[in-house]
């Protein structure tokens, strides 16, 4: 364990992609699904120059769509999204807050025109976003997302599933990237579908962004979600109707997908 003073003295530096990739795969719960649109990779180094935390900053799969849903007059240049953030398992709980504080200072110094730091918290994997709540980020509600799993609970990204469908059943209308399997395909492949929540969090980085928060299309507040707000709906591979379940049915390990063979960033 490090002392509070130790943590504050740790260095925040740019991390080589390969080093970040190794760390993320080891310490992040979905380490093989890597961000594609990454602009900055930062690492936290202790006094022995050992990497103890990594964060990737950039955008998700639909950057402009994401920010326009939140703010009418903003574009991709106005925000970064946290892609991956993970810390070494030996660090104490308050380490995330100190790490995020240093990341925010870096952005204010090196990206002075940036307005917002945005992120999602995977409620579908049992994560309400307590790290972001402790850092006083604003909460903006949730969307419903989905993943697939086999009967052992191993999870599959929807994009991977659409690729499997194309390969197994051939290209046809409705098999675009991100398309979902129909009942026959789910039954054939023995795929369960799980729906759950993804929670939105945002941090204004300057006076202008704090004013814009009041004009947002989203009601930002501090009425944070807790574990009791998590929920899941399961569609078993042999069924046509969802049923509500009360605990996460997923194996919280690596995605079973094709991304592990791709470069870390495009």
Image (tube, rainbow, N blue to C red):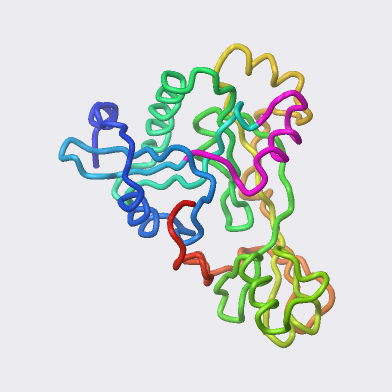
User: Does the magenta-highlighted stretch encompass residue 55?
Assistant: no
Residue 9: % across, % down: 24, 27
Magenta part of the protein: which range?
A: 57-75
Look at 73% across and 40% down and name the residue there.
65
Q: Is residue 110 above or below residue 41?
A: above
Magenta-colored stretch includes residue 74: yes
Q: Is residue 251 left or right of residue 2?
A: right
**In the rendered image, the vertical position of residue 51 relative to residue 79, given as above or below:** below
Q: Position of residue 18 (x, y in %)?
A: 33, 53
> How many dots with numbers?
0
Q: Identify the image quadrant of residue 194.
A: bottom right
Residue 36 spot, x, y in % from top left:
53, 51
Query: Given the current orientation, which residue lies at the most extreme top position?
Result: 207
The residue positioned 30% from the left and 51% from the top of the image is 19
Residue at 41% across, 30% down: 103
Answer with the quarter of the image where residue 216 lies. Answer: top right
Residue 169's place in the image compared with 194, above or below, is below
Image side of residue 78 versus residue 212, left or right: left
> At x 64% / y 77%, what residue is drawn?
164
Q: Position of residue 117 (x, y in %)?
A: 56, 31
Residue at the left extreme? 48
Q: Which quadrant would residue 133 be assigned to in this image?
A: top right
Q: Quadrant of the N terminus?
A: top left
């Amino acid at each position: 364990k490090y002392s509070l003073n130790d943590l504050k003295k740790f260095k925040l530096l740019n991390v080589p992609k390969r080093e970040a990739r190794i760390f993320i795969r080891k310490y992040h719960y979905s380490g093989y699904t890597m961000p594609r649109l990454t602009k900055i990779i930062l690492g936290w180094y202790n006094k022995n120059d050992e990497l103890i935390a990594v964060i990737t900053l950039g955008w998700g799969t639909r950057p402009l769509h994401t920010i326009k849903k939140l703010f009418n007059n903003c574009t991709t240049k106005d925000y970064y999204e946290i892609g991956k953030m993970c810390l070494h398992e030996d660090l104490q709980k308050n380490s995330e807050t100190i790490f995020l504080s240093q990341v925010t200072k870096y952005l204010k110094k090196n990206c002075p025109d940036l307005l917002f730091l945005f992120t999602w918290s995977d409620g579908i994997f049992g994560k309400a976003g307590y790290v972001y709540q402790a850092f006083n980020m604003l909460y903006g509600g949730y969307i419903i997302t989905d993943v697939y799993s086999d009967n052992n609970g191993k999870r599959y990204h929807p994009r991977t599933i659409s690729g499997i469908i194309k390969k197994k059943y051939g290209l046809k209308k409705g098999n675009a990237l991100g398309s979902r399997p129909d009942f026959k395909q789910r039954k054939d492949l023995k795929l369960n579908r799980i729906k759950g929540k993804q929670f939105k969090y945002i941090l204004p980085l300057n006076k202008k962004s704090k004013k814009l928060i009041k004009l947002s299309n989203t009601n930002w507040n501090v009425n944070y979600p807790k574990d009791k707000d998590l929920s899941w709906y399961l569609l078993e591979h042999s069924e046509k109707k969802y049923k509500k379940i009360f605990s996460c049915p997923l194996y919280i390990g690596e995605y079973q997908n094709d991304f592990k063979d791709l470069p870390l960033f495009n």
